[in-house]
Image (cartoon, rainbow, N blue to C red):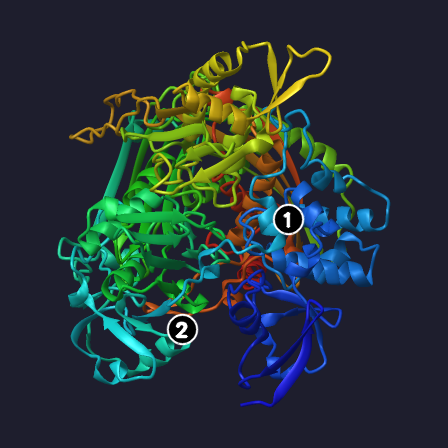
Amino acid sequence: MAGTVSFQVNGENQEVRCPEDLTLLSYLRDHLGLVGSKNSCNQGHCGSCTVIIDGKAKRACTIQVSKLAGSRIETIENLSADGHLHPLQLAFMKEGAVQCGFCTPGMIMAAKALLDANPHPGPEEIKQALRFNLCRCTGYAAIIRAVQLAASVMRGEDTAATAVENGAAGRLPPQGAEIGSSPIKKDARPKVTGSPLYADDIKFAEMIYGKLLLSRYPSARIKQINLQKALAAPGVIRILTAADIPGRNSFGLLNPHQPVLAADVIRYIGEPLAVVLAESEAAAAAALPHIKVEYEPLPGVFSAEDGLKDDAPTVHSGGNLLHHVSVRKGNVAEAFTRADVIVEGDYTTPMVEHAYLEPEAAAARLEDDGVISVWTASQGSFAFREMIAASLNLPVEKVRVIYTPAGGAFGGKEEPTVQIHCALGTMLTGRPVKMVLTRPESLIMSTKRHRARMHYRHGATADGRIIAMEARVLLDAGAYESLSKPVVFRAGIITAGPYDIPNVKTDAYGVYTNHPPGGAFRGFGTTQVTFGAEQQMDKLAKALEMDPFELRRINGLAPGKTTITGQVIKSDCGYLKALAEVERSLKETLQKLPRPAPGKKIGLGIAGAYKNVGLGAGKNDQAGASIAIDLQGRVLLKVGATDMGQGSDTVMAQIAARETGLAYEDFIVISNDTAQTPEGGVTTASRQTYISGHAVLGAAGVFNMSFHRCLAEGFNLRPGEYEPVRGGINNLNQKDNRKFISYQEIAAAAKKAGITPAGEFIYTAPPTYPLRERADHEEGIPISNYDVHFAYCYAAQAAIVEVDETTGQVKVLKVIAAQDLGKAIHHQNSCCQIEGAVVMGMGYALSEEFVLENGHVISDNLAKLKLPKITDAPEMEIILVEEESEGPFGAKGMGELPLNPTAPAIINAIHDAVGVRITDLPATPAKILTALINKGRE
């Protein structure tokens, strides 16, 4: 034990006798309950735990309490201790710099340390001050704008941010109801104050903690598990294995074949074998090494290519080919004979980790009525409930899943990790259980973006018309199916990109390997093929000596043209407009570009993309919503959609406010709770604005009828005789002195009259159809013309890069991103979403890769993932192309697509700069330098 240490936290004296290894982060969270400092990596790699120590921004997970004698520590909780928000907190809200919110407290504290020392920081000084703070959502641009605004406010030059707080009270007209406006997001205030929101912030009396024993091998047979020594370890209550699961020992959204706890065979390095339940997390972790497992190592499959070999070991008894999607259109062989130019190429993209900053976590409790409640971040609580209930052998009504805000997801929280184990522990012990993955555990266990190997061949006539394309796409599906089938499907049908090509032959394959499962990841299979397709477009343009914009214009999808599946494009296609906007802006930008320094070259690259909105392919795509005023006068909007930081709660409240006339500020949004909300399906496929938005519109229509009736029968008021204001309505019949009637009074009068001011609605998306594959697979037979998806969104981007010819280093100077998203419901948030996607795409292009070696994880911490930092963030220009669709108020969707064009645009720009084409992502300096050396030898 260390001696007694005295210091201050938020002005209060602390006197602590603590172990040498007690970190400040643990002390703040576990002893003081100051959970605003977040534990994302516990290794000093992310900055989510940043606090201010003696005026300096420090990462609390790296500081030992024993070293803090005499220190003054400030946490995020102190910034609003007097009830008023700090200018930084207000500015983050106003600028839309809050998405998932997990990094936000650390960002704000790092920024406060900067502004306390430097009230006039420039953009580069802000970047340097925040260089240790990662953000996976925003792309950093809004954060920089927020710090600049806060600095201006603190200098007395700007009062804009204070209006955020001052406008939150008082009986004022409704704000933010207009479609296309940018009201403060519903979840912004709690996130900027560091309120306890996330699953790891939850504590219950008598809570115990669970830790998973993960496999040491990527491919093995389990011969024996000996628990005897571990059961005797201090604090251990129980250890669970597969034999303790009363129901189905497997899970999966589409194919429930992934074991909850492995019983016989290990198929990847992150496979859980046992759960240790103990009085503390430390005790549970300490017991893990005492579990003795006897393995029989087996041969493994460590690439999709190897998985298809005749002599490959089989990952599953049915073989290694998980799924094959073929698209046939026209007569490809004949069309290639007519082509004046043919280009082909091989392209590979890496396996990538989602790197959401909140590690997977869950807390479970047994309720008095026998229901097991599970608090967790997920992209679909109803799907989680079904999987938990199946493993616990309980009816679904005995399981409740309550959504806690996700500190990032990007597709990676569509399926369970610790949630079933957590609920099982509660059921078998009767005590609340919490489980939180460490960052290394999360990296090993979680699903990944599929590694892809692609071969493309395009044929075009001299006038630039692409008349033939064939492609083969091979995707590493990992050890279990997860969402690989629909990912392979998307890759197969989007292979050509947003172009009308009359003769097509494509094949996409998903192959089982002994790698972590390939799952849903922003872009969902379309990201990989966009990289291949858009490099092919630039190679074609060069071969034809044609401007790359012109080539894309000639072949780009437009109303009346057809996709490679034969679907006729509707009138809401904005691809050519997006392309034109990028071309216009690029020309203006080039006039202002400075000359590059000696040894450096400037390059320009463009790319286009499109992606589906909604599930499509004949799937039943539904969502529900309800609106009601309860007896406390609360206006409750309940939706099944998941707000993972992308702002769906806010968008739903905007739609409800616009359609009902009630104040946006009055809507309390409850989402993704199996006991309270209608089902909304999994938040995926950029579907929620369209599907749940329509559900909210329908619910608002039903609500309006009941609300009008309540006012007519309770207060003798007809439409036009009252106006909604915050908290209730003004009676316009009282001309000289308007009478305010609160919602609580309205609800009481409605109850007396036997009426409920409420409305509920379930919306079903327009019909779609499965891809019609011909049995004979012969060319020359037209494919069926059915809508595979009911809507698509479109994007175009340009990248300007600077390449150092002596080192291979690439600096992205600017990205211009134009996006057709239908009508933007929340304009600011749409732009911020695109900024975040662009920086994620930049990481995909230049640095990110999840590295495995024979199934063993090399990328075992956040630093090794090489995520983009704020110092890497380029200038970004965001252009919204609003081609109104059949969605609510003309909206479609856009969360995933803006990621896709960034990497190919950057790679095309590198080629333009120095004449080498990197076909194997990421384009690291070493790869570029090698290509330059080889080019010099030619």
Is 578 on the left or on the right of 422, as rendered? right
Q: Which of the pair 305/324 is nearer the observer?
A: 324
Q: Is residue 616 above or below residue 919?
A: above
Name which of mark 2 and mark 1 comes first in the sequence: 2
| SS of the residue under disc 2 | helix
Would you call the spot at circle 1 few (<14 residues within 10 Å), some (14-19), or many (20 or more)? Answer: many
Q: Residue placed at 34% from the left, 27% from the top?
A: 503
- Residue wearing tag 2: 281
- Expressed as whole percent of the image width and height from the top left, the position of residue 184 reads 63, 38
Residue 11 visible, this angle: yes
Q: How many marks?
A: 2
- Expressed as whole percent of the image width and height from the top left, the position of residue 785 reads 29, 20
Residue kind at label 2, given as amino acid type = Glu
Q: Which of the pair 219/613 is nearer the observer?
A: 613
Quarter where residue 111 is shown = bottom right
- Residue wearing tag 1: 913
Image quadrant in which the C terminus is located? bottom right
